[in-house]
């Protein structure tokens, strides 16, 4: 099926609970899957199901697809310890005028999580989770839940970015969705503002004297080669990848990461494609989409899927693409 153009697309039950800031409280004393012996001889400390870009709503196959994906991940022979969702949880609120319609999408997402998921879930905010940035109505802009506020409320988050520790790793969850500085084809751009980048550097620098590995989670990828092929981006005679597809401040991250060797892994969504890139000591993984082509089959040859990520005690990581509708 021809994929929708992004330009035009406008139970391991009860093992733990997770608060908005990422703090986990264990409900039982059990041997986690991560603690099992690994064939590569390394000690795995955490197994993550990276399930991003659900784009769920009440129509079509979205609710059943989300349920199948969650059940598939949690019933694997080697199941995950946690689920990471890097955004675009709902189909769309960016260009949806009706507040009730947006809240209905969040109701579907949260009700399925409640009924089908027995694992802690880490949340980041995606562009389609931001309400009303594409709408001109002043009545939307004056609503207390305008922008990211509704997503924060529905996901139980105090802030759109935060950090936490788990299994010997440090995690930073970024808010990569920001308003563009000037007229743009898109109502958002992938970047950090000065306040958030300062926070990121202070948080990472505080671990400089340790060997604790760091994983960064964002919706929009910091670095992604697959975005070159998401449309005819070479037609002008030069490669052109919009700043809403990949972080426009990627060079700033690159230069800073050279001074921050603890940063080992960056996980993101947004592309609806899967890739794993190793660049200057950091692995960048974009993890496809649970919805595939917005619940219309494959997107650029990538079926609806999630990615299993293993984190090891030595600071290394690996990943595997899992199509949950196929054997």
Image (spheres, rainbow, N blue to C red):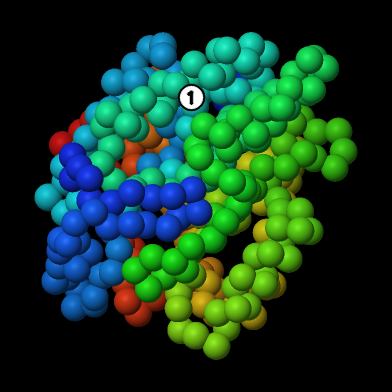
Observer-nearest of 319 and 123: 123
Relative to 239, residue 252 above or below: below
Residue placed farthest to the bottom in the image? 209
Residue at x 42%, y 58% (from the top left corner):
23
Residue 292 horizontal side relative to residue 104, left or right:
left
Looking at this view, name the residue that lies furthest to the right: 182
Task: Look at the image and tell me whether residue 2 can be seen.
Answer: no
Which residue lies under the disc numbered 1?
106
Q: Quadrant of the C terminus?
A: top left
Q: Where is 183 relative to 140, above or below?
A: below
With respect to residue 320, does 91 lie above or below? above
Residue at left offset 49%, top offset 85%: 210
Q: How many numbered marks does the figure carry?
A: 1
Query: Quarter of the image holding residue 148?
Result: top right
Residue drawn at x 45%, y 74% is: 213
Above or below residue 218? Residue 199 is below
- Picture coordinates of residue 265, whole percent (x, y): 47, 65
- Kindly indicate the quadrant of the structure image that contains residue 52: top left
Q: Closer to the camera, 242 or 217? A: 217
Name the spot of residue 229 as percent of width and height, x first.
55, 41
Task: Give residue 264's position: percent from left, percent from top.
Answer: 48, 71
Packing grade of label 1 (10 A; few <14, some 14-19, many >=20) is many
Q: Which of the pair 260/116 is nearer the observer?
A: 116
Q: Quadrant of the N terminus?
A: top left
SS type, badge 1: helix
Side (left or right) of 44 relative to 185: left
300 or 282: which is nearer to us? Answer: 282
Q: Is residue 148 left or right of residue 306?
A: right
Residue 244: tell me if it is visible: yes
Q: Residue 108: x percent and y percent?
A: 41, 21
Identified at 78% across, 23% down, the residue is: 141
């Amino acid at each position: 099926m021809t994929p929708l153009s992004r330009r035009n697309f406008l139970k391991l039950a009860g093992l733990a609970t997770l608060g908005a800031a990422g703090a986990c409280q264990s409900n039982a004393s059990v041997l986690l899957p991560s603690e099992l012996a690994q064939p590569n001889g390394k000690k795995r400390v955490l197994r993550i199901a990276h399930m991003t870009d659900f784009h769920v709503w009440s129509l079509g196959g979205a609710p059943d697809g989300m349920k199948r994906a969650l059940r598939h991940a949690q019933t694997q022979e080697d199941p995950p310890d946690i689920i990471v969702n890097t955004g675009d949880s709902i189909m769309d609120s960016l260009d949806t005028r009706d507040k009730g319609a947006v809240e209905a999408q969040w109701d579907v997402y949260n009700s399925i999580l409640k009924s089908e998921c027995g694992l802690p879930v880490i949340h980041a905010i995606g562009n389609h989770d931001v309400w009303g940035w594409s709408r001109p109505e002043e009545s939307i802009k004056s609503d207390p839940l305008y922008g990211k506020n509704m997503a924060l409320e529905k996901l139980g988050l105090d802030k759109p970015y935060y950090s936490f520790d788990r299994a010997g790793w440090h995690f930073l969850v970024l808010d990569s969705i920001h308003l563009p500085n000037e007229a743009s084809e898109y109502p958002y751009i992938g970047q950090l503002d000065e306040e958030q980048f300062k926070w990121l550097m202070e948080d990472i620098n505080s671990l400089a004297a340790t060997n604790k590995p760091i994983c960064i989670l964002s919706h929009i990828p910091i670095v992604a080669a697959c975005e070159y092929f998401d449309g005819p981006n070479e037609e002008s005679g030069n490669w052109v990848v919009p700043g809403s597809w990949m972080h426009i401040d990627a060079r700033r991250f690159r230069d800073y990461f050279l001074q921050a060797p603890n940063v080992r892994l960056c996980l993101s969504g947004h592309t609806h494609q899967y890739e794993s890139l190793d660049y200057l000591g950091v692995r960048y993984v974009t993890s496809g989409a649970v919805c595939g082509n917005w619940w219309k089959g494959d997107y650029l040859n990538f079926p609806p899927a999630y990615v299993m990520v293993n984190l090891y005690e030595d600071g290394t990581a690996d990943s595997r693409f899992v199509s949950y509708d196929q054997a």
